[in-house]
Amino acid sequence: MFDPLLICIALLTMLAGMGKRRALWKVGRHENVSGSWAVLVPYLLNHAKILKRPPAGVAHLFLFWGFLFFLLIVIFGQFPLLLPPRPAQVVSLVLDLLGVAMLLGTAGFLARRLRPQEVNPPRRVLLPLATLIVILVTGFLAEGARLAILPPTSFWASPIGWSVSLALPQSPFLMQLMIRVHFFAVLFFIATIPFSSMRHLVAAPLNIFYRSLKPRGELLPVSLEHGPLGATTVRDFSWKELLDAEACVSCKRCDENCPAFLSGKPLSPRNVIQKVLRQMEEGSLRAPAPTPLLAETITAEEIWSCTTCMACVEHCPVLINPMEKIVAVRRSQVLTRGEVPAEARPMIRNLEIYGDTQGNGIAYRGDWVFSRDVPILPSGHWAGEVLLWVGCSGAFHPDYQEVARAMAKILTAGQVRFGILGPQELCCGDPARRMGEEALFLDLARKNIDRLQHYHITRIVALCPHCFNTLRNEYPGLGGHFEVVHAVEFILSLLEQKRIALKYALSGKTAIHDPCYLGRVNQIYEPLRRIVRAIPEIECTELGRTREKGFCCGGGGGRMWLHENLGSRINQLRAQEISEAKVERVVTACPYCLTMLQDGVNSLGVQRPPKVSDIVTMVASSIG
Ligand code: SF4
Ligand code: SF4
């Protein structure tokens, strides 16, 4: 008679606790986000992302399906349905096997948390896992005790229960005792969900349901007029960004793929998320005292170590975006306190005064063009096929000027009617935006959009993945809608249309290095590989960390202009990996990667370091 009352108390405790948790993330700003069952249901059912780390992923799969099946059994058990003997035995068998799988999965998670390298695993993680083990073990004991006092049944319907029954006495008391312990453990588990790591059972699916549908490469916009200017306290995050923190399961997949963390810098994306979570909780305890500043716990070293490579975003199994939290704190430091790292100030000043990162000035922006074959757009209407977006590196960096000239050669060979903006092109604004200088970004972006619209440009080929990402994903939010492709995509289309042909061989084992802003950020992996494979006699190979797992060169997110004096150098780690692959050449498609990897391989101290090439120059050499 008391059981229904106890069940109600457990459920109400759980609901009240979740209500309190909801109040925590609801202190965030309003954000219009629509949920999608079409995203959530397949995500949960196939577990594809979670299974990318096999042992933990498989354990989670067992627990998920086991939990679901047991829940269905409990729900259907409330109705007077009588299954025929054979289906009932099949259900019993499935329950038995799922119980074993769940027990193994839970034991695996518990063992992982108790490894010596896990410093002080928190009680809120250990307690629910221990409770789950009690639930599963007492479930088997209750079943074994039941079978021990019943007439013999077939083994196959309940192999584990049957085996356990052999070791138990015929004792109705023992059976009742196990059932009660099992029942109370289940109630305890349900009631403590909001107060333990198991609240991810609610928060994680909710976070996936409300996952952001904007392009991955687009940073959340800032309103300079209405604020907030980045995130100074957790209240400056939107409720969805705070739900992100609530959903974190501390699995460390973000850390395991973060170049800053792996190179020994004081940045752990997991810690950033956990700090946001703790501040959310502390903020509610402190109320009505002011919410603590994020800068009290998230240090400048942490936020400026990020290369915005999005490895954390790619690998998070519950779709959390630690990178955007880091950029939000950067924005707050830059926009409210003017705290840009000293070594990046000259670059920012160059952007403000000259409109390019090198500070050469727009008058010289077309100087890389040696040939009259590259038309610089005149004023007025332009009826060309594509605009070549050269970028600051292509316009001014000696190595990348070569790449820009090679691209012009390829376009000319393919008889593409193209042009460049020359002195009318400004920096796309990517370094400013990623360094938190939103006002500067908006200024550059709006001027560029005005000029592109003035010439009625509709199609743009961008040389640099950072320009490509900004033009394709961030300009539409400011009214700049253009069809933007990266150079590798355009070159591949020229090859497929047979407008150019790769004739001359380039021998040698060649490894691919995926630029983060092409690969992880915009999911463009294949064109680079297909072009390399199309070059005669070349042997294309992959590095250990490739595609989604590709290791950053260390130059994104404004890091190109910052000193790297904490931990080891990211470009040197990547260069070491390239050297261990025993390749003659590594090919990439980004000016930052080209510079950083060249520096990296030069520092290897070997006699013949691997050559670092841009795919565009290789194609230009091969077309002859
Ligand atoms: S974006 Fe890259 S560098 Fe920044 S925290 Fe994530 S993984 Fe680390
Ligand atoms: S942010 Fe995502 S990947 Fe990182 S620890 Fe949390 S859940 Fe795991």
Image: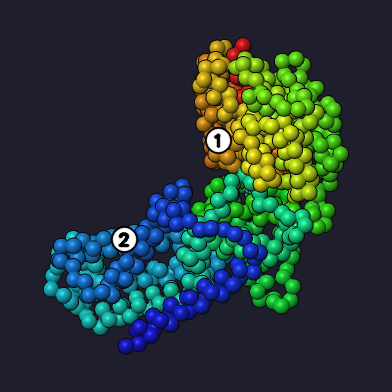
- In the image, the residue with mark 2 has its CB under 8 Å from the nearest atom of ligand 2: no
Q: Residues within 10 Å of mark 2 (few under 14, many from 20)?
A: some
Quadrant position of residue 370: top right
Going from N to C along the chain, the mark reached first, 2 or 1, is 2
Q: Are marks 2 and 1 in contact (CB under 8 Å)?
A: no
Q: Secondary structure at mark 1?
A: loop
Q: Residues within 10 Å of mark 1 (few under 14, many from 20)?
A: some
Give the amino acid type for the residue marked by disc 1 in the picture.
Answer: Ile
- The residue shown at (51%, 26%) is 530
Q: CA distance from mark 2 to mark 1?
A: 39 Å
Residue 310: x %, y % from top left: 61, 46
Front-most of residues 454 and 31 = 454
Which numbered circle lies on residue 98?
2
Q: How is the image coloured?
A: rainbow
- The residue shown at (28%, 60%) is 97
- The residue shown at (81%, 57%) is 336
Residue 376 seen by the camera: yes
Q: Secondary structure at mark 2?
A: helix
Give the amino acid type for the residue marked by disc 2 in the picture.
Answer: Leu
Residue 177: x %, y % from top left: 30, 81
Q: Is residue 349 left or right of residue 57?
A: right
Q: Which residue, given by chain and number where applicable, does mark 1 sit on?
A: 524
- In the image, the residue with mark 1 has its CB under 8 Å from the nearest atom of ligand 1: no
Which residue is the extreme one toward the bottom? 1
Q: Is residue 604 left or right of residue 105?
A: right
Residue 460: x %, y % from top left: 65, 31
Mark in front: 2 vs 1: 1
Which residue is the extreme one toward the left? 151
- The residue shown at (85%, 28%) is 363
Residue 554 seen by the camera: no
